[in-house]
Amino acid sequence: MSVINFDFRNEVLSHNASLSYCYQCATCSGACPVALATAGKYNPRKIIELSILGLQDKLIEGVDVSVWLCSTCQTCVELCPQKVELTEIFTLIKNRSFEEGKIPEGFQLQGQSIVDNGVAIPYSKAIESRREKLGLPKVKTASVDEIKTILKETNFEKNILKVGK
Ligand code: SF4
Ligand code: SF4
């Protein structure tokens, strides 16, 4: 059974008061491309509802409402009649999950890949030759060394390794 956590709800509200403006019209979930692609399994309206109710355990541990699936395309933010800043709220929830060491394995692996390669999905010969066949230009990448330095200085590397254990 889920437990209402008022502290969690107040924490989200103190960081982003727009949460309280939501009147559950479902415009966001009706337009969300991830909701459409997953036949409604991913549902931004539901995530906002759970946040308003303070159901922290469902948001942070519930695989069925995974906030991590949001692609941050901002469609919902642009269309919300109440100007709820959904993606900002989702970032707060993701940060909280990260602090508690509860992030999906796939995202942890991508974080580790960024530490190792400077990108979430490393380029491979197969990707390069497919791009060539499609007539696409070579992908320009930033300096891996510079990225690694930033990740080290900001403690990202230490934290992502900690979560992976
Ligand atoms: S579109 Fe805005 S007001 Fe409507 S359910 Fe989504 S967040 Fe709430
Ligand atoms: S920002 Fe996230 S929740 Fe909003 S429409 Fe895009 S994928 Fe859906």
Image (cartoon, grey):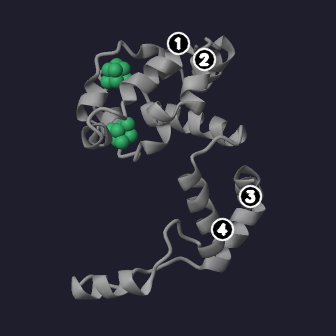
Instruction: Mark 4 or mark 3: name the one nearer the start of the chain.
Output: 4
Instruction: Mark 3 or mark 2: name the one nearer the start of the chain.
Output: 2
Q: Which residue is mark 1?
A: 53
Q: Which residue is mark 2?
A: 9
Q: Which amino acid, mark 2?
A: Arg
Q: Residue at x 52, y 65 (%)?
A: 120
Q: Which amino acid, mark 4?
A: Val
Q: Quadrant of ligand 2?
A: top left
**Figure quadrant of the N terminus:** top right
Discs 3/2, front: 3
- Residues 137 and 1: in front is 1
Binning the other alpha carbons within 10 Å of mark 2 as few (below 14), some (14 to 19) or many (20 upward) gives some
Q: CA distance from mark 4 to mark 1?
A: 36 Å
* Residue 115 image label: 4
Binning the other alpha carbons within 10 Å of mark 4 as few (below 14), some (14 to 19) or many (20 upward) gives many
* Residue 161 image label: 3
Report whether 131 appears left or right of 112: left
